Image (tube, rainbow, N blue to C red):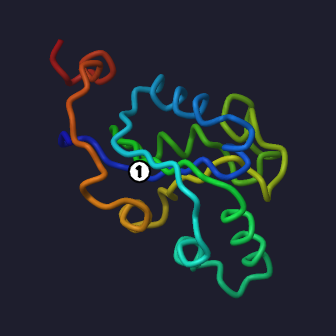
């Protein structure tokens, strides 16, 4: 990982998986210039769901969140790049797809707040990336490698 890179957690939720959007979503991040360093197709169990959504425990929508995220497989990913969290969040759109701009993932594919296709770490929540990455991935599941396209994406890389 170079000095200007950060890692961020992203997950295609059950509705995105069921609708066959994994490839489209991965392509968007790759086309943006981000580097995939970890990916895992998995079924989230209740324990992991409770850990992931722990901040919402006790809220009226919590049980629905857990039911939804455990209802079908997800595709968990770790992306790397300059200001990756902010880049990803801008590409994902607002939590409510109805408020998301066209061209964002939720603006293009989401219609319902409860089924909004994708989760991305919050850039305003200090430590969210590390917490979520550690929750879903072991260190050895993340691959640190050079990407030849970096010189064509970042101005300060040598050609």
Tell me: 74 left or right of 64: left
The image quadrant that residue 18 belongs to is top right
In this view, the residue in front, 38 or 83, is 38
Query: Quick one: which residue is furthest to the left in this view?
Result: 158
Residue ID at (35%, 49%): 7
Q: Quadrant of the C terminus?
A: top left
Query: Quick one: which residue is furthest to the top in this view?
Result: 159
Residue 157 to residue 1: above or below:
above
Residue 125 to residue 155: above or below:
below
Residue ID at (46%, 49%): 40
Q: Quadrant of the N terminus?
A: top left
The image quadrant that residue 145 belongs to is top left
Secondary-structure class at tag 1: strand
Residue ID at (47%, 40%): 87
Q: Position of residue 105 (x, y in %)?
A: 66, 37
Residue 72 to residue 110: above or below:
below
Tell me: 55 left or right of 15: left
In this view, the residue in front, 25 or 72, is 72
Q: Residues within 10 Å of mark 1 (few under 14, many from 20)?
A: many
Q: Position of residue 73 (x, y in %)?
A: 63, 53
Residue 51 to residue 33: above or below:
below
- What residue would you read off at disc 1? 8
Tell me: 111 left or right of 6: right
Q: Position of residue 5 (x, y in %)?
A: 28, 42
Residue ID at (20%, 30%): 146
């Amino acid at each position: 990982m170079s000095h200007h890179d950060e890692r961020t957690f992203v997950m295609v939720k059950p509705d995105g998986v069921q609708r066959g959007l994994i490839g489209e979503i991965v392509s968007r991040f790759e086309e943006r210039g981000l580097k995939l360093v970890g990916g895992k197709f998995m079924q989230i169990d209740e324990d992991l769901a409770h850990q992931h959504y722990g901040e919402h425990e006790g809220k009226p929508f919590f049980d629905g969140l857990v039911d939804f995220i455990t209802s079908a497989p997800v595709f968990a990913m770790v992306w790397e790049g300059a200001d990756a969290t902010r880049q990803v969040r801008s590409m994902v759109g607002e939590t409510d797809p109805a408020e998301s701009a066209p061209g964002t993932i939720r603006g293009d594919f989401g219609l319902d707040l409860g089924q909004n296709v994708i989760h991305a770490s919050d850039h305003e929540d200090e430590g969210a990336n590390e917490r979520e990455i550690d929750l879903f991935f072991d260190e050895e599941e993340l691959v640190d490698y050079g990407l030849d396209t970096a010189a064509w994406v970042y101005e300060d890389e040598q050609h």
